[in-house]
């Protein structure tokens, strides 16, 4: 049975515009988590109340709404301090969930790999630790003195110590996973294939595009894709053929979101490490979302935070099949450098790959290497260092058409005769 929930948007007066858009996002998050939204409230404040976040009058209004609508859950669009949550639970007599806890719940459902599950549990325990007093409030008051220490306090300390040990254990396990991933990444970086990170706000169609690009290829199972926020959390890499015949590795990363809790940014940073190590960023925007321009700014801010703003970029508007003619014309007028893309109809897919190929050409170049009969010992090194697109006889030697980094080309060309095609 779906929980009946009331949403509460809260913000400071200086950011009043953000409250409305963020509340709309909270609605989608709550629906993704399985809630039945029965009412919404919002309030802008000069400053937050340290004790209860919102004012007494608004609390009474929400309490009345919860009674009338028989809502058992109230979801706040900010992260609540432990004391604020405790006060609101007493005043509203309902389950109080803040934005962080809601996102954690969705992440817990969506994580599929062992690393993703470890990261979710670490974030959940980090969130839970300062809120333990709420679980043991029946024992929270102690008189003090010899012989008066109650079992509740001991239980609370046991629980806190257990969580601290578990957090330490999870961090160690994650470090092992990261070390293994680092070795795999180093091995993959040694393979002569450019890396492209597919990024964007959550639910812009990244997984759908990746499926469209790899559909029909052997050993390429489809990536889970759904019209929900955070449908996929774990990064997925697939080989994609570029128009000239070479290959690139395209990695689908976790979707971005505004007001992402700090602990989640830290816990899921490893899922975004692919962005930092990429040769090119393919950034998707969903223009069918009325708030897409603000979402674009959120994506740009995270790319900057990751230190990846200097990387070559290809930007495209996804879900072009859902756009009206007037919308398409307006977007093309305002953003002539962006592509219109539809993974459903195939519109713009080949143009997007051509643009990616063009951006990669700054580091990955097409070269022809002609080897004499005495230089064939270089063949093994060439296959380790470059993508060999073709190998044909050339007199007594061999002509190789390569896709190769500038660094490797300079190294190999010093050892053999070469020319650009």
Image (cartoon, rainbow, N blue to C red):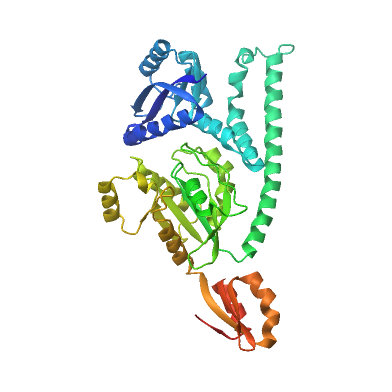
Q: Is residue 14 visible?
A: no
Total labels drawn: 0
Q: Is residue 242 above or below residue 268?
A: below
Residue shown at 29%/55% (left/top)?
A: 332
Q: Residue at x 42, y 50 (%)?
A: 284
Does residue 91 appear left or right of residue 15 in this picture? right
Q: Quadrant of residue 172?
A: top right
Of residues 372 and 103, the one nearer the viewer is 372
Question: Residue 367, percent across and down?
Answer: 53, 77
* In-image side of 378 versus 341 (left or right): right
Residue at 38% across / 32% down in the picture? 24
Q: Can I make out residue 151 in this image?
A: yes
Q: Is residue 86 above or below residue 348?
A: above
What residue lies at 36% left-to-right and 32% top-to-bottom? 19
Which percent across, then down, holds residue 239?
57, 57
292 in relation to 420, above or below = above
Q: Position of residue 131 (x, y in %)?
A: 58, 25
Residue farthest to the front?
Answer: 216
Measured as percent of width and height from the top left, residue 335 is found at 31, 55
């Amino acid at each position: 049975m779906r929980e009946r929930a009331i949403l509460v948007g809260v913000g400071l007066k200086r950011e009043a515009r953000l409250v409305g858009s963020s509340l709309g996002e909270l609605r989608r998050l709550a629906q993704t988590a399985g809630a039945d939204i029965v009412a919404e409230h919002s309030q802008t404040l000069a400053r937050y109340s340290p004790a209860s976040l919102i004012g007494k009058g608004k609390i009474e209004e929400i309490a009345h709404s919860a009674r009338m609508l028989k809502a058992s859950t109230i979801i706040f669009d900010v992260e609540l301090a432990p004391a604020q949550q405790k006060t609101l639970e007493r005043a509203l007599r309902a389950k109080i969930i803040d934005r962080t806890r809601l996102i954690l719940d969705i992440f817990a459902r969506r994580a599929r790999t062992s690393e993703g599950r470890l990261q979710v549990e670490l974030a959940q325990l980090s969130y839970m630790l300062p809120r333990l007093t709420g679980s043991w409030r029946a024992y929270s008051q102690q008189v003090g003195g010899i012989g008066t220490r109650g079992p509740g306090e001991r239980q609370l300390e046991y629980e806190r110590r257990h969580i601290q040990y578990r957090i330490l254990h999870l961090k160690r396990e994650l470090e092992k996973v990261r070390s293994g991933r680092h070795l795999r990444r180093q091995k993959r970086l040694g393979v002569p294939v450019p890396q492209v990170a597919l990024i964007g706000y959550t639910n812009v169609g990244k997984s759908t595009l990746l499926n469209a690009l790899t559909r029909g290829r052997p050993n390429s199972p489809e990536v889970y894709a759904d019209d929900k926020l955070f449908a996929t959390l774990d990064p997925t890499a697939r080989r994609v053929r570029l128009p000239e015949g070479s290959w690139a590795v395209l990695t689908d990363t976790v979707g971005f979101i505004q007001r992402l809790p700090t602990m989640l940014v830290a816990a899921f940073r490893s899922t975004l490490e692919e962005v930092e190590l990429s040769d090119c960023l393919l950034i998707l925007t969903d223009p069918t979302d009325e708030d897409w321009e603000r979402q674009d700014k959120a994506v740009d801010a995270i790319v900057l935070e990751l230190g990846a703003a200097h990387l070559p970029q290809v930007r495209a508007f996804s879900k072009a099949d859902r756009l009206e003619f007037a919308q398409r014309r307006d977007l093309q007028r305002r953003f002539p450098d962006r592509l219109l893309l539809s993974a459903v109809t195939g519109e713009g897919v080949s143009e997007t790959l051509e643009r990616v190929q063009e951006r990669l050409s700054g580091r990955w170049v097409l070269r022809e290497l002609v080897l004499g009969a005495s230089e064939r010992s270089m063949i093994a090194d060439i296959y380790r260092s470059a993508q060999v697109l073709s190998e044909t006889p050339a007199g007594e030697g061999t002509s190789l058409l390569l896709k190769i980094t500038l660094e490797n080309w300079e190294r190999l060309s010093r050892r053999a005769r070469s020319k650009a095609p």
